[in-house]
Image (tube, helix red, strand yellow):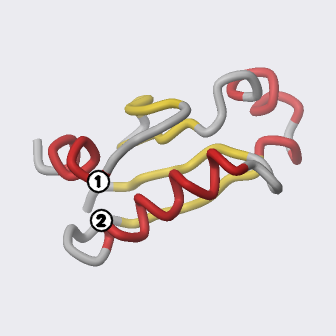
Amino acid sequence: MTHVVLYGKVDCELCDEMKAVVDEVRREVPFTFDVVDVSCDPALDAAYGLEIPVLVIDGRKAFKHRVDTTALRRRLRR
């Protein structure tokens, strides 16, 4: 099964928007999903802090900052 990870931070509007898109697509397309707060890990904060939110699909960076439902559906169905 496809695994999706959203790297973000608490109180991040873009992160909340991206999570809402993921939640909407998840109702139609099955995949596992985790949210990781990069502020809890200095290495993750260094890697993703300036790009958040970052959406990683099966270990590969797929989107940063924004995503829409059409683009995410298309990427998950590849």
Q: Which residue is mark 2?
A: 25
- Examine the rendered structure and indicate whether residue 30 appears above or below residue 46: below
What residue appears at the point 20 percent right and 73 percent down from the top-left corner? 28
Residue 61: image x %, image y %? 44, 29
Residue 64: image x %, image y %? 51, 30
The local crowd at label 2, few if under 14, some if 14 to 19, many if 20 or more residues have their Cα within 10 Å, is some
Camera-side residue of 14 and 72: 14
Q: Which residue is mark 1?
A: 69
Quadrant in the rendering for residue 31: bottom left
Camera-side residue of 39 and 68: 68
- Examine the rendered structure and indicate whether residue 41 appears above or below residue 62: below
**Circle 2: element type:** helix
What residue appears at the point 40 percent right and 41 percent down from the top-left corner? 67
Q: Could you tell me which quadrant the N terminus lies in?
A: bottom left
Q: Earlier in the sequence, mark 2 or mark 1?
A: 2
The local crowd at label 1, few if under 14, some if 14 to 19, many if 20 or more residues have their Cα within 10 Å, is some
Residue type at numbered disc 2: Val
Asked if marks 2 and 1 touch (Cβ < 8 Å), the reply is: yes
Quadrant in the rendering for residue 38: top right
- The answer to whether residue 43 is left or right of residue 60 is right
- In the image, which disc is placed on residue 54? none
Residue 71: image x %, image y %? 24, 41
